[in-house]
Amino acid sequence: MRVPLSLFCLTMLAAAPAQAQYPGGGTSGRATGETYRVEIGGYIWNPAPEIIVRSEALTQARLGSTIDFEQDFGIEKKRFNQIKVVLRPATKHKFRFEYTPITYEAPNATLRRTIVFNGQEFNLALPVSASLEWKAYRFGYEWDMIYRDRGFFGILLEAKYTD
């Protein structure tokens, strides 16, 4: 009986305490997923070319047809790419930039109806070409007034420029 009791006491003295707790030094204090300095994203989208123009909206002409690029020129649906960059110099500050180039072309189209553009009549079956090039830029600044490890609340100021 003495030997088992001695072994039990020796085992109890030699045992180390269990360290079940996470030994990490704590969290970074940043919101979940917000541990970056630069974020770069590329997006692909496939919008329908629902582009409608009236010539009298562009000039002082009083006569004009509504021109539907999809119906009148046969412009087809096309995929576009978009680039987005976010710079984060400090925890509560972000600078945003987006660029979207949009181009539609119908180089060898034939008018499917008679239209009036800027007071001038274009007859049915007339060969025409149409192109639309549009570049959209978006610049933004985000300031997070309240910033916690589970989320943030702030103000976003943006400017959009189209060329």
Image (cartoon, rainbow, N blue to C red):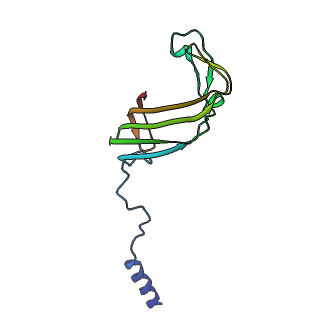
Give x and y (percent) for residue 89: 31, 42
Residue 90 in which image quadrant: top left
Q: Is residue 90 visible?
A: no
Drawn side of residue 93 relative to residue 2, left or right: left
Q: Is residue 158 above or below residue 36?
A: above
Give x and y (percent) for residue 14: 37, 79
Quadrant placement of the C terminus: top left
Residue 55 in which image quadrant: top right
Give x and y (percent) for residue 46: 58, 40
Towards the viewer: 76 or 35: 76
Q: Is residue 143 above or below residue 19?
A: above
Q: Farthest left residue?
A: 89
Give x and y (percent) for residue 67: 61, 23
Q: Is residue 21 above or below residue 94?
A: below
Q: Is residue 82 visible?
A: yes
Towards the viewer: 79 or 97: 79
Drawn side of residue 145 relative to residue 126, left or right: left
Q: Is residue 25 above or below residue 142?
A: below
Who's the residue at 51% across and 31% down the image? 132
Question: For the image shown, how many numbered marks are present on the structure?
Answer: 0
Towards the viewer: 50 or 125: 125
Who's the residue at 44% across and 48% down the image? 33
Who's the residue at 40% across and 42% down the image? 85
Who's the residue at 46% across and 88% down the image? 4
